[in-house]
Amino acid sequence: MKYKLIIIGFGTVGQGFTQILIEKKNWLKTEYDLEFEIVGVSTKSKGSIANKNGLDPRKLIRLINKKNSLNEFDGGVAGLTTLEMINYLEANILIEATPTDLTTGEPAASFCKAALRKGLHAVTANKGTATLHYSELKKIANLKNLTFGIEGTVMSGTPVLNTVNTNLAGCAINSFRGILNGTTNYILTEMESGKNYAAVLEQAQQLGYAESDPTGDVKGWDAAAKVAILCKVLFDSEFKLKDVKSQGITQITCDDVIQAKKNGYRFKLIGEANFRKGKISAGVQLEKLPLSDPLAQISGTTNAITFETDLLGPVTIIGTGAGGKETGFALLADILVIHRANV
Amino acid sequence: MKYKLIIIGFGTVGQGFTQILIEKKNWLKTEYDLEFEIVGVSTKSKGSIANKNGLDPRKLIRLINKKNSLNEFDGGVAGLTTLEMINYLEANILIEATPTDLTTGEPAASFCKAALRKGLHAVTANKGTATLHYSELKKIANLKNLTFGIEGTVMSGTPVLNTVNTNLAGCAINSFRGILNGTTNYILTEMESGKNYAAVLEQAQQLGYAESDPTGDVKGWDAAAKVAILCKVLFDSEFKLKDVKSQGITQITCDDVIQAKKNGYRFKLIGEANFRKGKISAGVQLEKLPLSDPLAQISGTTNAITFETDLLGPVTIIGTGAGGKETGFALLADILVIHRANV
């Protein structure tokens, strides 16, 4: 089966996803009878290109890295806005990979809405959209028998949301607890070797683990958004981000970390939620865990989450939580969900 | 949608599964529009009962625990053999929950084959059948567009096989490594407190963690069967159990365990496999792991597995590996796979 794709946002994630399509082209055809044609790519500041007959993915990546603009693509209609492109093309799936805005969830939410209204499945890695517009977009998708996929918003491609939605679907899950932000976990891990917070943050920025404005990570907002998304998927689609009590790691000192280590403890930024008697309590906080706690063993940029289930007890998933290819894989994982439902 | 079920084997797993259907009846209907009717239950030595109009699951459990025979069930045809029952009833899914035989995989394999040939999906928790007859049964199922589900054969209900088959399907997995047997992990954990092997084994038997004949667990055969099943699902459906080099834990002494602990190590029975250049190397062996190895932190009857993936790096799943309800859940998880493909 062949799917026509529109990709919105062509940064690390959009390119990571496209690179996977290039590298896995033959394998996806052989294993799953799955073919893709990218018919449009739209960006905020680097132009856009649409072609009903398809765009060569290698050329797209070469062009964006060389010229920094898609408008110069040879063949197709250049310069359409995202909404114009969704209307102009007859695509099957919108791949939404624009940067997260935790205040409005826009413009990603409007793009997903337009796509779903036109009959496209929408797949996003955007935490803002998933946090602030989940119930509305999910409702439209359900009404139209389409998929609104958000696997990439929690722990990037590590299969968390699709796992609770499918393979753990027969269980009731009433709480979860995890390390949901790789940047802060990297900082806390590195501080154990005696470096102070500011030095490690700078190191994380140089390595690309932290953004130039690291506020969203270090204040706990990114982890809070993931907690909110999990609460929506697991407990109540109307749950609000503002109801996650969140704390960051900015107050921690090198002495705190080393003293804790001496006493057999580690500081971890823990995101968690409980659902009891119809009420959700959710938060992100810095916790001093004994080394015997499995979450104390999660180091560097790795993420981990434990779900408490009624039939299996605790089920833990550990894996990467960021990266262009890793999040690109999440978009592919959601497409495979769509594909399995259609064959 | 309503499914008519035949349950073969009515021990811990068959009853655990039935208990879940009783407890989750309303929830499964509301959440997934899923209804079940048990139309037949067959056992090796405790009789059988079939009724085209359905059997009350509560009565089935009460009867087997009180009278130890299903032949006395009030209403229906008693005493049919399993194969007669499969022919007599018009069911949708065979739930195969007989004890594992790692030498022949029978009679479970013949039951699954008869069911698939008649057009029923077959779902099994039987490691013998999955290890020795996987490719044949999978082939019949594929030809008839049916499901042969084996989620319960590795780490009971903890979602491992369905996760690699669905949510990790876009990744290439070339190796895995894990703690796949809870009995031996419990013994190794308990020996750290200074008890010797024989004493801990007896304790494990009293707690129901080890069977009266513990050979299959302590010699590593159970873990080897799980390694073989994973190799078949991931790498090559023709892979043979005899090609897993396996070692057990019977040679270990209390001194070994305590000495290792003093030096910052733990003994673990590790099942692993690598797939390189079309060749599989697979084994089960006792390894001395540094405490920094995540698998060294898995204690008691808990199981864990790490898959090396091309796009995500390592992905680890930790959870329970045994139990009637836990394995019963795996059977339900496979039914949900069937249900999702049919709605």
Image (spheres, coloured by chain):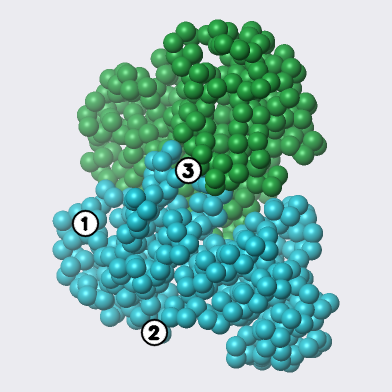
Chain colours: A cyan, B green
Q: CA distance from mark 3 to mark 1?
A: 32 Å
Q: Residue at x 30, y 68 (%)?
A: A245
Residues behind callouts 3 and 1 on a single chain: yes
Letter of the chain that mark 3 sits on in the rendering: A
Number of marks drawn: 3
Q: Residue under label 1, please give it.
A: A265
> Secondary structure under badge 3?
loop
Disc 2 residue type (three-letter):
Asp
Q: Earlier in the sequence, mark 3 or mark 1?
A: 3
- x and y percentages locating residue A272 in the rendered image: 34, 59
Q: CA distance from mark 1 to mark 2?
A: 29 Å
Q: Residue at x 39, y 49 (%)?
A: A174
- x and y percentages locating residue B60 in the rendered image: 52, 18
Q: Residue under label 2, please give it.
A: A213
Residues behind callouts 1 and 2 on a single chain: yes
Q: Earlier in the sequence, mark 3 or mark 2?
A: 3
